[in-house]
Amino acid sequence: MEESYEISDPRVLKVVAHPLRVRLLGLLRTDGPATASELGRVVGESSGSTSYHLRVLARYGFIEEDPDQRDARERRWRARHVYTSWDNVRMAATPEGREAVRIMQARQIEALVRGMRAFEESPDPDWLPAAGMSDHLAELPPEGVREFYRRAAELIRELEDRHAGHPGVRKVHLWAAAFPGETRGPAEPPDSGEHPDSGEHPEEDA
């Protein structure tokens, strides 16, 4: 697969932001090629419904037919890219672009919640010490946040290389998000000496 599908047209971003399409694309990226029937069983949809949405994804360049067709009676699809990316500045220039990003971010949150719930329903004891969430509060400029994303991606690739072949390796969903916090207005009183939580919650990681 190619590394990234960079989208500049908000209409294309809205195509993949459809709840079923984004999930089908995610399954093809994480689990590999599949047919409409196979994907339909996973997401609880008919093969006719999944087949339609797969064709839409193919029309806009997200997926393609797998050249290794195991059964000539049914198309097998594969993802074309590892992930989807877009320029927030360019998308924010139009109402349509802002709406597309808002919908896409909502889909990302839905995927996070779905992953959390799936683990809660069937927790793997070996993964309890590592699985979970933590949040951090940092004082950074926009340049620092961009560096954080870049270095996080580099670290992930480094860790994948280091642990390649480890018997405990599984596909792990990792999320990163950054949004500036609210600033205190000038009319509010000065610091009373009480300080907010640091944002680190290691005890909640499990």
Image (tube, helix red, strand yellow):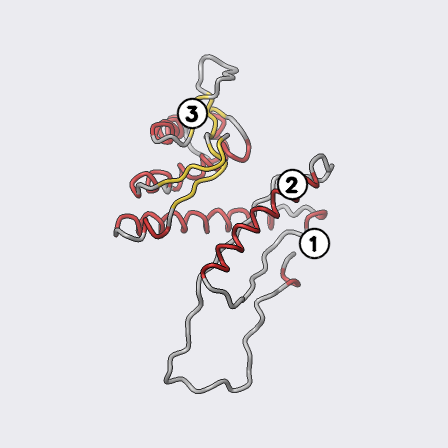
In the image, what residue type sits under mark 2? Answer: Glu
Q: Report the disc number at residue 64.
A: 3
Cα–Cα span, label 2 and label 3: 26 Å
Q: Percent position (x, y) of residue 138?
A: 54, 66
Secondary structure of residue under mark 1: loop
Q: Percent position (x, y) of residue 169?
A: 68, 39
* Image point (37%, 51%), residue name: 88
The residue wearing badge 2 is: 160
* Image point (37%, 31%), residue name: 57
**Residue count near mark 2 (Cα–Cα under 10 Å), binned few <14, some 14–19, many ≥20:** few
Placement of the C terminus among the 4 image quadrants: bottom right
In the image, what residue type sits under mark 3? Answer: Glu
Q: How many marks?
A: 3
* Drawn side of residue 22 relative to residue 173, left or right: left
Q: Report the disc number at residue 129.
A: 1
Cα–Cα span, label 2 and label 1: 19 Å
